[in-house]
Amino acid sequence: MKYVNKFVWLAVLFAGSSSAAELALNVEIPRLNVAEYHKPYVGIWIENSRRQATQVAVWYDVEMANQEGEEWLKDMRQWWRRGGRALELPVDGLSGATRGPGVHQLQTELTDAIKNLPEGEYTLRIEAAREVGGRELLSLTFSLPLETNEFPIQARGNSELGLATLNLSE
Amino acid sequence: MNNLKTKIVLGALVSLTALSFPADAHRAWLKPSATVLSGDAPFITVDAAISNTLFHADHHAMSLNGVEVTAPNGTSLELLNSSSGKYRSVFDLELTQQGTYRIASASAGLRAFWRDEEGNRKMWPGRGQQANESEFATAVPQNADELRVMRSSRRIESFATVGAPTYEVLEPTGHGLELAFHTHPNDLYATETATFQFFIDGEPAAGVEVEVVRGGMRYRNSQEEITLVSNAEGMVEVTWPEAGMYFMEASYQDDQAAAPATIRSGGYAGTFEVLPL
């Protein structure tokens, strides 16, 4: 089995270099029928097998006066622990405003995040925390180099997140 | 041999301790409103109380005299809006530095217990007073019945962190019963195992008896306490069964006391927040 994987990797290595497929994430923030709705804070990062994180994106209240929006970043508990707490926010190319219900795509950020990662098994994590709401964490495992036949990789949330899909775009 | 000696000493002390330290029979705790924080200068509010039902203030307020807050850079932080009520004391802290803060009340001193000629129990210094060692010889009759002289230390503490955890304030002081944190006290998660190491006067403390209890006790039928004993290196491992605010209480006793004491005792009480994974 291990040998098979090695051959597949080898094949993809060549295939990958020619096709230049890029990793793309579609993540859905569901529309919620609640009395008091605040857009969720969302943290997205990649962990290697030793749980070391590479940051991909963080959506929070960047516009609030005196950076008060940073006060709730810790509510994304795992994101906070896996590197969020060590960041000097805002970080260019990482921080963004909160997003409302709908499907949001990330591609450039992901491509940047994985370009210096060594080959191996990784987990993309998406964590959402909403004021007067809940918290949810989705995990999508993938490997580097990217294997075409692995995709799409999907996970579906039950409360704060909808469908999350990792795909390769040509 | 050593164990036997310790046991005898412990046995003799049980009744004395119970009588002489009424506050010790209860749990003294410092409970921050939050321990993991983000932002530039968040506030926390801290409750300080003595009560057995954790963390429900229903017995005595804890005195704020002696409560010291150390900021990440080692400076002392001012207690804001301090107030003491019937059942609890409270104060606010403005956490303007990034890093880990220590909130602690530590004390140590010489104590003596004996019986006078009529058989009445006596203690020195008096309840709630600090010993002045130069008065020991005149205040304590050296040939009294059941004379016990001990050096006792006591530490009550908790921690809060803004941003990434730092380690400067966690350094043991070398005095009394203390913890060294191999797992950061503000990086605790349900189902994970934390490793702490007990020290007595700067040396690893073996055989420390430890009890860990989760807060919210009013809403369950049993204490659900975890009991542990530190190993030869003073190490204990705690696996947190679920998220919550936890109280860790530990006590230690041996005969390695500096004269005129013959008994050395240390008490430790820490409040630790465990977050869900």
Image (tube, coloured by chain):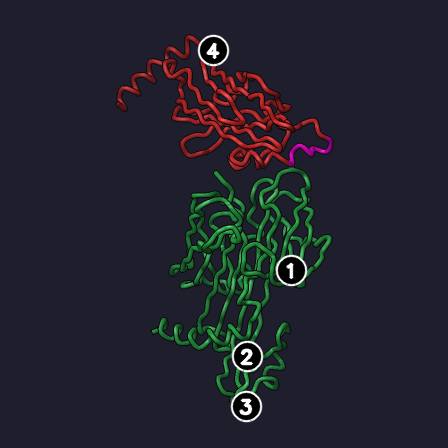
Chain colours: A red, B green
Q: Is residue A75 above or below residue A15?
A: below
Q: Amino acid at mark 1?
A: Tyr
Compare marks 1 and 2 and give the one earlier in the sequence: 1
- Residue B181: percent from the left, percent from the top? 49, 52
Q: Amino acid at mark 4?
A: Ser
- Residue B68: percent from the left, percent from the top? 64, 58
In the image, the segment drawn in magenta is: A65-71
Callout 3: SS: loop
- The answer to whether tags 2 and 4 share a subunit is no
Direction from residue A69 to residue A125 in the image, left or right: left
For residue B61: magenta? Answer: no
* Figure disc tally: 4
Label drawn at residue A169: 4
What residue does disc 2 label? B112
**Residue mark closest to the camera, 1 vs 4:** 1
Q: CA distance from mark 2 to mark 4?
A: 78 Å
- Residue B163: percent from the left, percent from the top? 60, 40
Label drawn at residue B87: 1
Label drawn at residue B118: 3
- Residue A9: percent from the left, percent from the top? 34, 18
**Residue mark closest to the camera, 4 vs 3:** 3
Q: For mark 4, does the 10 Å Cα neighbourhood hold few (<14), some (14 to 19), or many (20 or more) residues?
A: few
Subunit that carries the residue with mark 3 = B
Direction from residue B34 to residue A19 in the image, left or right: left
Q: Residue at x 39, y 26 (%)?
A: A121
Compare marks 1 and 3 and give the one earlier in the sequence: 1
* Magenta stretch: helix, strand or loop mostly: helix
Give the camera-side residue of A29 and A170: A29
Compare marks 3 and 2 and give the one earlier in the sequence: 2
